[in-house]
């Protein structure tokens, strides 16, 4: 326990109050110093470093608006849709809270996707920040669950049929699937029981886990320190700055420098966010789907069921996994085994083992339905992100000092990801109406995109080592403002 | 870093061009509806038409009569002109039709119209555009049980609700060639049969008012929302400027 400090009776009132609390709750002061005023962040953060604090802001917006929505919302299949319209019409300011929440959901994904991409650009997941990245990926998974279950609550047609489609996917899992889907729904079709459990998960269970993970993400980050656009460890550089003799020279206190800096980001973000809330809350059917203004009707299936934009990249990977895709995967595995036999400098036992694994994989691929593999592909695409710290073997951490063609490869990756998003929004089937192009389907393009996505990550241990990195500077590059 | 900026812009463009999230519902191209939710006279005329011609079969179950005060009607005016039976001014707009009979007559229950203008939007345009087109695309078709059909919604269950105003019209088709087949294509022109009580121009204006009302009813706060939004953005602009200068003041001495 810290020593009890006496303070002069002539000290100013502020100092007296501060001393009173410091003697009784020193932890608060120590934590404030550790995470704010004496947390030394690299001084060369750029535009991409706004999105972490913005993600935290959106989380707070979602929690606060969510609390107010729950005051008026009725989680009951007979009343849910009506209660949302009640919020929109009869609750004073209800429309504002609801639009903030619905826009916030999309904003969360925009911000988180950009935040994750920042990590990929500058190698922020590399040693010693693996856990920071893993907690982040877990946050992303939670966020997907949170968004999916929240989307059922307005009980519109898209809410209902989106949930129906996604929960049905679980029934494709061999052996346990149908029972698992029944457990999730609580009924044989999506219904009142589903709505109630999704409500419970959406407002209590998932947010609790989410907040816990966010705390872990931040604590782990502050233990190892922030990365920066140059991908250099400032802790390994010279020591001593004008705030502390032990702090890294290239570090500056988070508060006030980055807190003030982030306020600028917050203001600009809020301008975009509130422009949407006040002038275009539907965003042309992308944030609030038009069909969702029709109450859920279990007897009328909409002609085109599309998830909200933030899920569509993964949704199109699911749709791309047809029998053709399964055959392509079998061929790729076979080629991989042949390549291992020809090129791998390993023992015969090892090669034999690889061949057996390959054969088993092909047998499994052909045994189970393509729908199940679609679920595996969709889930795998997210789970794969967790392993990124061990997949990337590039000598240079930041994209700045990697070979130039790495930048182009990342650009192609981003284009494919966006293309998968667009394909997931579009109706499946031929993209062009002309009969001679009927083979050129949405699923075919999505299949190529999916193979690129998996190839990008799974082949990263090899391609990331290729090429000559540029010389990495000793100190961070920083131009005074 | 310029590569990334170019990338972001080009992808934003691609997303923008890919259009609305929903597929078109088929039928003819939608005309642009003359929607202006700040035109109170148009909204009031639309409300009158709505109560007289739509509300008999369709409900607007989330819309309260007294919300019409937002479009400039007094509570007394609403009571005297728009309430016909035992409704209270604070009630929601419920139709008197028996759902079972409606199903027997039209094959389906007439949908609730509160959110119709929001839910019918799609790649073809806004929900108001769709409704504006629909209500101006009826024609006589003796092969249908109701005697009516619609170019924007083939085999529609609803007979022409405004036929007394519009009269009867026939669409003009012409033979066109498409992918080696001869097809009958709508020319966009109509021939007037029996005249209605309104001229075609008056009718288009009346439907425009009705659709304008439906658009407003989908979200009665929409005018207020935009008005507040302007002030919020101005405030945030001021905040941004202050934050930007504050940031510059702090970072001045970081070398």
Image: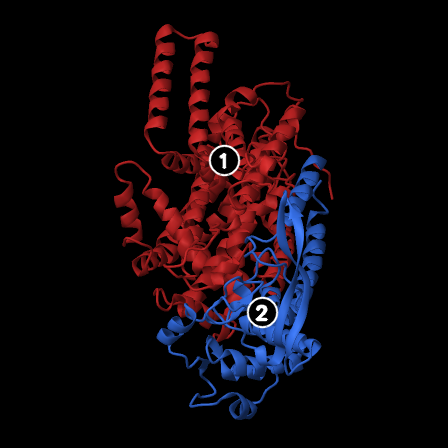
Chain colours: A red, B blue
Q: In the rendered view, tell whether residue B51 sits above or below residue A17.
A: below
* Quadrant housing residue A69: bottom left
Q: In the rendered view, tell whether residue B37 sits above or below residue A279.
A: below
Quadrant where the C terminus of chain A lies? top right
Mark 1 burial class by Cα count in 10 Å: few <14, some 14-19, many 20+: some
Q: CA distance from mark 2 to mark 1?
A: 70 Å
Residue A40 x/y as whole percent? 57, 41
Query: Is residue A182 something one can see in this rendering?
Result: yes
Residue A467 x/y as whole percent? 62, 18
Residue B149 x/y as whole percent? 54, 67
Q: Are marks 2 and 1 in contact (CB under 8 Å)?
A: no
Residue at the spot x=70%, y=35% of the render? B3
Residue A215 x/y as whole percent? 44, 47
The label number, if any, that marks residue A385 in the structure image: none
Q: State which chain disc 1 sits on.
A: A
Q: Nearer the viewer, residue A131 or B222?
A: B222
Q: State which chain disc 2 sits on.
A: B
- A382 displayed left or right of B197: left
Q: Nearer the viewer, residue A168 or B122?
A: B122
Q: What residue does disc 2 label?
A: B138
Query: Is residue A36 something one can see in this rendering?
Result: no
Residue at the spot x=42%, y=28% of the render? A326
Report helix, strand or loop for mark 1.
Answer: helix
- A352 displayed left or right of A123: left
- A458 displayed left or right of B41: left
Q: What residue does disc 1 label?
A: A224
* Quadrant housing residue A340: top left
Are labels 2 and 1 assigned to the same chain? Answer: no
Q: In the rendered view, tell whether residue A371 sits above or below residue A284.
A: above
Q: Nearer the viewer, mark 2 or mark 1?
A: 2
């Amino acid at each position: 326990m810290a020593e009890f400090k006496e303070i002069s009776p002539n000290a100013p009132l502020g100092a007296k109050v501060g001393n009173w609390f410091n003697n009784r709750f020193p932890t608060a002061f120590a934590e404030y110093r550790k995470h704010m005023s004496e947390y030394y962040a690299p001084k060369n953060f750029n535009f991409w470093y706004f999105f972490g604090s913005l993600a935290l802001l959106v989380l707070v917006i979602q929690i606060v608006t969510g609390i107010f929505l729950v005051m008026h919302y009725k989680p009951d299949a007979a009343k849910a849709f009506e209660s949302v319209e009640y919020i929109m019409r009869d609750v004073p300011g209800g429309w504002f809270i609801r639009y903030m929440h619905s826009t916030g959901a999309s904003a969360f994904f925009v911000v988180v996707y950009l935040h994750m991409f920042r990590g990929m650009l500058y190698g922020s997941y590399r040693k010693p920040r693996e856990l920071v990245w893993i907690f982040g990926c877990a946050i992303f998974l939670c966020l997907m669950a949170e968004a999916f279950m929240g989307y059922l609550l307005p009980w519109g047609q898209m809410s209902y049929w989106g949930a129906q489609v996604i929960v049905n996917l679980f029934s494709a899992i061999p052996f346990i699937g149908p029972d698992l889907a029944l457990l999730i729904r609580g009924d044989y079709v999506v219904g009142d029981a589903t709505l109630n459990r999704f409500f419970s998960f959406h407002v209590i269970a998932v947010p609790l886990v989410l907040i816990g993970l966010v705390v872990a993400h931040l604590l782990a980050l502050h233990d190892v320190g922030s990365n920066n656009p140059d991908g250099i460890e400032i802790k390994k550089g010279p020591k001593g700055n004008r705030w502390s003799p032990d702090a890294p020279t290239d570090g500056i206190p988070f508060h006030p420098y980055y807190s003030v800096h982030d306020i600028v980001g917050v203001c600009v973000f809020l301008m975009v966010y509130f422009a949407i809330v006040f002038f275009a809350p539907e965003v042309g059917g992308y944030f609030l789907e038009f069909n969702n203004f029709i109450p859920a009707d279990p007897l009328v299936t909409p002609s085109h069921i599309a998830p909200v934009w933030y899920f569509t990249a993964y949704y199109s990977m699911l749709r791309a996994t047809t029998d053709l895709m399964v055959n392509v995967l079998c061929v790729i595995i076979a080629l991989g085994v042949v390549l291992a036999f020809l090129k791998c400098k390993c023992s015969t036992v090892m090669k034999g083992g690889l061949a057996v694994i390959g054969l088993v994989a092909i047998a499994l691929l052909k045994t189970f339905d393509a729908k199940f593999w679609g679920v595996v592909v969709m889930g795998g695409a997210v789970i794969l992100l967790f392993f990124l710290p061990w997949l990337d073997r590039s000598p240079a951490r930041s994209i700045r000092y990697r070979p130039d063609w790495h930048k182009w490869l990342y650009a192609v990756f981003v284009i494919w990801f966006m293309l998968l998003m667009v394909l997931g929004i579009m109706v499946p089937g031929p993209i062009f109406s002309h009969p001679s192009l009927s083979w050129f389907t949405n699923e075919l393009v999505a299949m190529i995109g999916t193979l690129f996505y998996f190839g990008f990550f799974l082949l990263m241990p090899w391609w990331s080592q290729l090429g000559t990195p540029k010389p990495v500077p000793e100190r961070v590059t920083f131009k005074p403002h | 870093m310029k590569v990334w900026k170019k990338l972001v812009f080009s992808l934003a463009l691609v997303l923008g061009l890919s259009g609305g999230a929903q597929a078109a519902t088929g039928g003819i191209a939608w005309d642009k509806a003359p929607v202006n939710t700040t035109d109170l006279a148009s909204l009031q005329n639309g409300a009158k038409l709505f109560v007289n011609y739509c509300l008999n079969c369709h409900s607007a179950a989330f819309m309260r009569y007294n919300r019409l005060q937002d479009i400039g009607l007094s509570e007394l005016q609403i009571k005297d002109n728009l309430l016909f039976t035992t409704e209270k001014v604070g009630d929601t707009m419920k139709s008197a039709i028996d759902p079972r009979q409606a199903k027997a007559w039209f094959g389906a229950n007439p949908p609730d119209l509160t959110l119709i203008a929001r839910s019918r939007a799609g790649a073809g345009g806004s929900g108001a555009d769709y409704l504006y087109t629909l209500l101006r695309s009826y024609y006589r078709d003796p092969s249908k049980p109701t005697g009516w059909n619609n170019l924007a919604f083939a085999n529609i269950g609803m007979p022409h609700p405004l036929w007394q105003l519009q009269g009867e019209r026939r669409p003009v088709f012409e033979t066109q060639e498409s992918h080696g087949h001869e097809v009958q294509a709508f020319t966009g022109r109509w021939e007037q049969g029996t005249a209605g009580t309104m001229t075609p121009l008056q009718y288009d204006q009346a439907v425009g008012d009705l659709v304008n009302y439906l658009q407003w009813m989908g979200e009665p706060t929409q005018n207020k929302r935009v008005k507040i939004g302007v002030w919020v953005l101005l405030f945030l602009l001021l905040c941004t400027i202050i934050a930007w200068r504050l940031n510059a003041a702090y970072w001045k001495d970081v070398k």
